[in-house]
Image: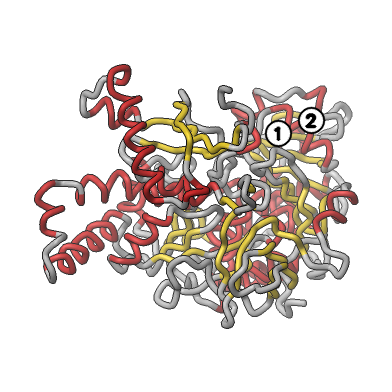
Amino acid sequence: MIKENFIKIYEDSFKKHWDLPCYTDYGENATYTYGQVAEEIAKLHFIFKQCHLRKGDKISVIGKNNSRWCIAYLATITYGGIVVPILQDFNPNDIHHIINHSESTFLFTSDSIWDNLEEENLGGIRAAFSLTDFRCLYQRDGETIQKFIKHLSSNMEEAYPNGFSKSDVKYEEVPNDKLIVINYTSGTTGFSKGVMLTANNLAGNVVFGIHSQLLHEGDNILSFLPLAHAFGSAFDFLTATAVGTHVTLLGKLPSPKIIMKAFAEVKPDLVISVPLIIEKIYKNVILPLINKKGMKMALNIPFLDTQIYSQIRKKLVDAMGGQFTEVVIGGAAMNSDVAEFFHKIKFPFTIGYGMTECAPLISYTPWDEWELGSSGKILDTMKVRIDSKDPYSIPGEIQVSGENVMAGYYKNEEATKAAFTEDGWLLTGDLGTISQDGTIYIRGRIKSMILSSNGQNIFPEEIEAKLNNMPFVSESLIIERDHKLIALIYPDYETLDSLGINHELNLEKIMEENLKNLNKQVAVYEKVTRVQLYPNPFEKTPKKSIKRFLYSSIAES
């Protein structure tokens, strides 16, 4: 058990960092200090007490990243409630199901999402509050919440006649073994389960973040991953708030143009990202530079290439604000060619490994110790084993145990039982190997692995990584049909149009050429038979992994 009490971490942080900036919504001038966040939490606690909420009651939070999202989350757990963060990418039917399945009593939501929900399908909800200004959007018949909120300011003045101060920050005693979050996953298999995370699971991640000094008091960070996803939540939000970091919340879709502008303005001291965003920056910022004719020639000249790579690294670092110590990438597999290039130019990045069921971290290594092709070293608080005859060279399923491992799936004993081995190790569903020093190397997902007709294991992600780096390929998906591999490709129409290339006349020829070049790079049993163009971007999970189950039978026969 982690010795630091999770709730106490935040009680101490608000007192210690009282006057420091805490949360800013990107594009807005207003900033909450740590003291102001603590006061907003106290106001919500007033409402919870007035409504006789009990310890262990569930409160759902759904909406874009903003300050009030963070405040609602913290108010719930410091009151002794259980927070249910819901990804805003879920459709209304899924949202209804999650709120009802989790037995949530209150709902904090963005106004636009509330407009698409049906009150009659939310029978257990007593009230819904806006993440714009905390006004009460809905109250069940017989409730007097809206009336109480009108007099909230006078009630606060009466309770704190000398003003709300550090000494007033006192939170519920919540032992670390208590359930504190139910996080509903959105995986590539399409089945959503409520991951039960204890205070200890979250403390395992946050205490690691504190001790490894990922962030410091007074640092700046840009939060652009969905806060309802375990990766962004653990480090952009929870660790940052624990140490006194100033969090700027980007409540917009992180396109390369928007995010580069935000980086330049915020100048973050640490960047937490999923691979897709970094790969897009590589494609939009780096590739146009190194593909210039003169640059290609220069890179073939000994000694000159080192100077050029140094300039490229500086250009990329400056474009991302110029102040960060490293970029931590996780949540999905990164394109190996992109990783290799970034490693070659000594760009300060590292790739970690985790999953929602571990809140999320399993392994991490600082960028200057990280080994190319790996996913970092196992955390001291975690254990990893490989289900393989030779875990050092033959891939097998990665199994984990330790402080960060979930308590199970909410109201789903069957799924919980299937997720663990008989001796209590969590089955990750990932295939990999491990080195003697505890470094993890991931090969792919068990469910996406293809067994060839001659018994060879084919990892489609490895083929897709090569294909995605070829001309005019935006993204791809390798699927099996009649024992043959087929590549579904969504072309890079934007680049084609910018170069004036006619789709109808040239696209099939371009992709056939890509297919030839791809098959020169892969093993005989990995050769792709044909390409099938796909008209739209592939549907993805919030961590930007393609939902493979939607495309398993899409290829034409």
Mark 1 surroundings within 10 Å by alpha-carbon count, few (fewer than 14), some (14 through 19), many (20 or more) = some
Query: Horizontal placement of 117 versus 476: left or right?
Result: right
Query: Horizontal placement of 169 versus 272: left or right?
Result: right
Toward which corner of the image does residue 288 lie, by quadrant? top left
Q: Look at the picture and state if 137 lies above or below 236.
A: above
Query: Horizontal placement of 7 versus 276: left or right?
Result: right
Colour scheme in the image?
secondary structure
Query: Is there any visible trace of residue 477 in the rendered image?
Result: yes
Q: Look at the picture and state if 330 lies above or below 536.
A: below
Q: Amino acid at mark 2?
A: Gln
Q: Which mark is residue 528?
A: none
> Which residue is the site of mark 2?
139
Toward which corner of the image does residue 135 lie, by quadrant? top right
> Which residue is the site of mark 1?
136
Near-viewer residue (526 or 167): 526
Q: Look at the picture and state if 505 lies above or below 250.
A: above
Quarter of the image for the N terminus: give it. bottom right
For the residues marked 1 and 2, what is the alpha-carbon distance in whole angstroms? 7 Å
